[in-house]
């Protein structure tokens, strides 16, 4: 640069937006950071669902959704002999194959085909199969059962000492169980295993059914001599090294000694009708569960499983929530399927509908069983059971204590796995597409509640739940319930950086959100949450701003929403009505929203536009969009600060971002005077946020001579000078931006000097210099422009006396010394940042200002 150029540069006044060719890259970034800002707003409120039901009142077609209320009795559960016999005796087959030990019929067989089993008593055909089922309340009306002494005498009459010992343990359930190793050690110490026991007989009936005795759960008979010697109860059933006959005998002994007495105890307690019957029945069921688990007889490995299930199903008619949960847990452990599984899930669902029963789920491991069902069941086979299972989890997740319990049991991971299993059902041509949608409603509502917990965020990220939910949105984009629940999940999680980053990197999410906004533009609670999510994405990522803007139909959809919700509003009752904008008549059947609902949508929508405008490739295009500017100005004109403060503040911030771009195509630049007139409402309001945003806009618009004249004529400059007394660095920074541009015009400079602007600026430099070097640099720029007189340095301003000049020189000299200037900085991390700001923002202009004041003082 030549000496003449340096001389001109030395005397050139500062502007808020000088020639970008003379700026360094660091200065450009700094200026953009102060001029363009992202907006924040509150997350939409998610109302608590006080009514525990599967679906809302009018959210889904009534004829296609499963019921939320129903009655359930023991007779609703399936049994092997639920269909009456024909009464016709068939001729026996000549060929009689030798079959392995017969297993009891299963009330819910895994395979659709089962071998027929002839009745043990010919009279059974005449009695009919239904006569052997429990009926409602049958346990309380059963005939007296065999006395415990008879049971002990029958079981132990001819049994071996080992059997008698085990029988004694069965009578006292609190006696410790002898592990297999202890048994072998005892046999060794006594000189070998016990002697074989003779065959045993038993004629004592078990639980009694109407019309006859259920022989399936009677105590079994011995299998012959030597059976007792080969039996070890501690050995796990199903050992491949042992013959099936011996396994059956082992199970028979366990049944006679441990399980059968418990079933008799259940019958006795139910028939007694005592006050503590429910507690005793629960204890007995818990003991039964422990015995079955100890002997490895859970699942489908118990040969008398059918009779056991029938006995448990009968207890359901006692209609006790506490007992039914115990029965449901035990029944699920026995691996029921088909209709029985559905009815058990319905039973649990029915119990969970009452909030008073939540404490029962806290003290029961039934939640583990429900999550196991969701992990293991085939949704194509057991879709309705899965539906009621997930519906239960949705109800329970409304309780804060149970919500944390669900999270601790990895409910997020199980839900994500279930979503993946439901993808095949999510194809529109699938026969169970509707059922899959019903399940998704419950599942997404559960995830919506889990998203409230801060501890859930890492799980949503690690399990890939957010990506899976985007696939669900794509498959069920027409289902408002599913879309709203997922939008609530996204609105909660996108407020956090780790979840926001994952969602922003999901392929096609921006196009998906735009399509949903277009399809469901009339559903306010869905629209407001999708817009809030997009606002979070665009506030953190420059790529998100570009991807959203380039999504197909983005601006047409967003402007369409602006037109829709700007026209769907009614003033509050206490407000004097103005002439509202023309209401949208494209859908006359849709009711107009209140001013709060429309405001909420517009606040989120304007925030998205403001955040997108930060991108250097998107901002100029938005500033040149005449429709967008028209809506923004129309909002400033028609809304009041009393009813729409946040909306007007966001509109002003959006206009500030758009006014940063001074291209010839900018509509904001062309209509700068109109914008300035409308912003007076915010500048003169009692809202500090409104005043701050309006001042920032004036800082950009004041580069226009026309706007500067408007500011001086309407005495706006007096208000701006008063803002220098603010204790907020942000307010002072915005006020300095306006004064810097006003001081470029000599008549305006004189007016500002008469208002005492230079004195207030010196105070700002003294107060905020060590805290904010960027603000200190802008104050020096403003003072430089104010000390100009007629464009030449003919002398210091007449209004600044020697004492004021000396005080300003003292402050500048102190701040120009790096050690003195940075001695207030605390922390090594902030020290580097402050030094950079001191060098780039403050040092160059402060030196020039000090030299000018020293020269004129001399």
Image (cartoon, rainbow, N blue to C red):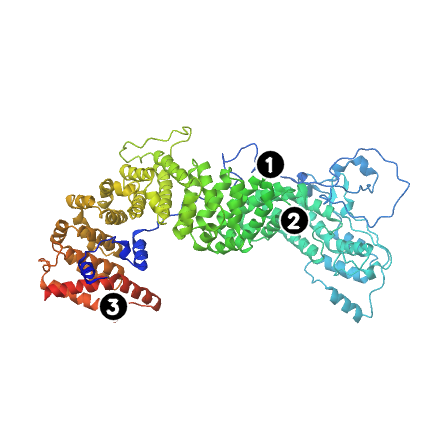
Kind of element beneath mark 1:
loop
Rounded to the nearest angstrom, the CA distance separating label 2 from label 3 is 73 Å
Which residue matches tag 1? 429
Which residue matches tag 2? 332
User: Which residue corresponds to the image point at 62% horizontal and 46% vertical from the top-left?
Assistant: 324
In the image, is 411 to the left or to the right of 239? left
Nearer to us of marks 2 and 1 is: 1
Kind of element beneath mark 2:
helix
In the image, is 334 to the left or to the right of 702? right
Nearer to us of marks 2 and 3 is: 3
Q: Earlier in the sequence, mark 2 or mark 3?
A: 2
- Image location (x, y in percent) of residue 178: 72, 64
The quadrant holding residue 440 is top right
In this rendered view, identify the residue nearer to me: 115 or 334.
115
- Image location (x, y in percent) of residue 217: 76, 48
Kind of element beneath mark 3:
helix
Rounded to the nearest angstrom, the CA distance separating label 3 from label 1 is 72 Å
| Quadrant containing the C terminus in the rendered view | bottom left
- Image location (x, y in percent) of residue 730: 27, 55
Q: Earlier in the sequence, mark 3 or mark 1?
A: 1
| Quadrant containing the N terminus in the rendered view | bottom left
Which residue matches tag 3? 821
The quadrant holding residue 250 is bottom right
Rounded to the nearest angstrom, the CA distance separating label 2 from label 1 is 33 Å
Whether residue 41 is visible, yes or no, is no
């Amino acid at each position: 640069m030549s000496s003449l150029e340096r001389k001109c540069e030395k005397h050139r006044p500062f502007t808020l937006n000088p020639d970008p060719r003379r700026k360094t890259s660091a200065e450009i970034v700094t200026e953009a950071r102060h001029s363009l800002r992202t907006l924040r707003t509150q997350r939409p409120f998610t109302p608590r669902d006080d009514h525990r039901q599967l679906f809302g009142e009018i959210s889904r077609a009534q004829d296609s959704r499963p019921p939320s209320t129903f009655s359930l009795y023991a007779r609703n559960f399936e049994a092997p002999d639920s269909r009456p016999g024909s009464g016709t005796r068939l001729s026996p087959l000549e060929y009689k194959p030798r079959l392995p030990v017969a297993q009891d019929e299963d009330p819910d067989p895994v395979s659709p085909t089962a071998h027929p089993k002839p009745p043990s008593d010919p009279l059974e055909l005449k009695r009919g199969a239904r006569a052997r089922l429990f009926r409602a309340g049958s346990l309380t009306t059963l005939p007296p059962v065999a006395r415990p002494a008879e049971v002990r005498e029958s079981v132990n009459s001819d049994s071996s000492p080992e059997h008698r010992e085990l029988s004694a343990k069965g009578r006292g359930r609190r006696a410790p169980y002898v592990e297999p190793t202890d048994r072998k050690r005892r046999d060794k110490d006594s000189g070998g295993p016990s002697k074989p026991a003779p065959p045993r007989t038993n004629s004592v009936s078990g639980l009694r059914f109407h019309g006859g005795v259920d022989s399936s759960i009677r105590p079994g008979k011995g299998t012959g001599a030597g059976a007792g010697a080969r039996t070890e109860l501690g050995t796990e059933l199903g050992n491949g090294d042992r013959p099936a006959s011996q396994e059956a005998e082992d199970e028979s002994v366990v049944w006679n000694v441990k399980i059968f007495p418990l079933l008799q105890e259940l019958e006795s307690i139910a028939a007694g009708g005592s006050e503590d019957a429910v507690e005793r029945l629960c204890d007995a069921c818990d003991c039964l569960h422990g015995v079955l688990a100890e002997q490895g007889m859970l699942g489908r490995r118990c040969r008398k499983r059918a009779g056991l299930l029938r006995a448990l199903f009968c207890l359901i008619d006692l209609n006790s929530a506490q007992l039914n949960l115990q029965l449901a847990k035990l029944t699920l452990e026995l691996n029921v399927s088909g209709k029985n599984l559905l009815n058990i899930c319905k039973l649990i669902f029915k119990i969970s509908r009452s909030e008073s029963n939540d404490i029962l789920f806290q003290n029961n491991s039934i939640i583990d069983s429900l999550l196991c069902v969701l992990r293991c069941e085939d949704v194509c086979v057991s879709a309705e059971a899965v539906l009621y299972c997930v519906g239960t989890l949705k109800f329970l997740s409304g309780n804060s204590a149970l919500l944390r319990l669900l999270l601790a049991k990895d409910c997020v991971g199980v839900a994500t796995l279930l979503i993946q299993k439901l993808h095949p059902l999510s194809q529109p041509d699938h026969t169970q597409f509707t059922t899959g949608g019903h399940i998704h409603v419950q599942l997404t509502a559960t995830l919506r509640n889990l998203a409230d917990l801060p501890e859930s965020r890492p799980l949503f990220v690690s399990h890939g739940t957010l990506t899976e939910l985007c696939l669900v949105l794509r498959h069920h984009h027409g289902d408002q319930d599913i879309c709203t629940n997922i939008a609530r999940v996204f609105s909660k999680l996108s407020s956090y950086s780790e979840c926001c980053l994952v969602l922003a990197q999901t392929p096609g999410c921006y196009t998906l959100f735009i399509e949903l906004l277009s399809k469901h533009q009339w559903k306010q609670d869905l629209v407001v949450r999708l817009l809030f999510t997009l606002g979070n994405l665009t506030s953190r990522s420059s790529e998100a701003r570009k991807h959203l803007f380039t999504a197909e139909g983005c601006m047409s959809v967003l402007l369409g929403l602006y037109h829709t919700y700007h026209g769907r509003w009614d003033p509050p009752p206490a407000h004097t009505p103005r002439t509202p904008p023309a209401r949208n008549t494209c859908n006359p059947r849709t009711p107009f929203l209140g001013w709060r609902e429309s405001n909420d949508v517009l606040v989120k929508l304007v925030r998205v536009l403001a955040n997108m405008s930060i991108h250097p490739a998107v901002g100029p295009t938005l500033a040149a969009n005449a429709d967008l500017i028209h809506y923004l100005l129309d909002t400033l004109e028609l809304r009041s600060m009393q009813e729409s403060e946040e909306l007007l503040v966001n509109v002003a911030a959006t206009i500030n971002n758009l006014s940063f771009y001074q291209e010839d195509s900018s509509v904001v630049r062309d209509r700068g005077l109109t914008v300035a007139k409308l912003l007076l409402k915010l500048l003169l309001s009692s809202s500090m946020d409104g005043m701050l945003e309006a001042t920032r806009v004036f800082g950009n618009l004041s580069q226009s001579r026309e706007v500067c004249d408007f500011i001086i004529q309407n005495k706006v400059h007096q208000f701006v000078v008063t803002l220098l007394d603010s204790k907020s660095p942000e307010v002072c920074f915005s006020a300095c931006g306006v004064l810097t541009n006003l001081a470029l015009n000599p008549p305006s400079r004189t007016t500002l000097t008469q208002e005492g602007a230079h004195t207030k600026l010196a105070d700002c430099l003294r107060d905020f210099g060590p805290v904010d070097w960027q603000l200190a640099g802008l104050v020096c720029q403003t003072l430089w422009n104010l000390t100009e007189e007629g464009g030449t340095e003919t002398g210091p301003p007449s209004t600044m006396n020697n004492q004021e000049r000396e005080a300003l020189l003292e402050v500048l000299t102190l701040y120009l010394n790096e050690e003195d200037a940075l001695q207030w900085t605390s922390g090594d991390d902030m020290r580097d940042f402050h030094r950079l700001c001191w060098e780039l923002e403050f040092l160059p202009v402060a030196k020039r200002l000090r030299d000018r004041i020293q020269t004129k003082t001399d």
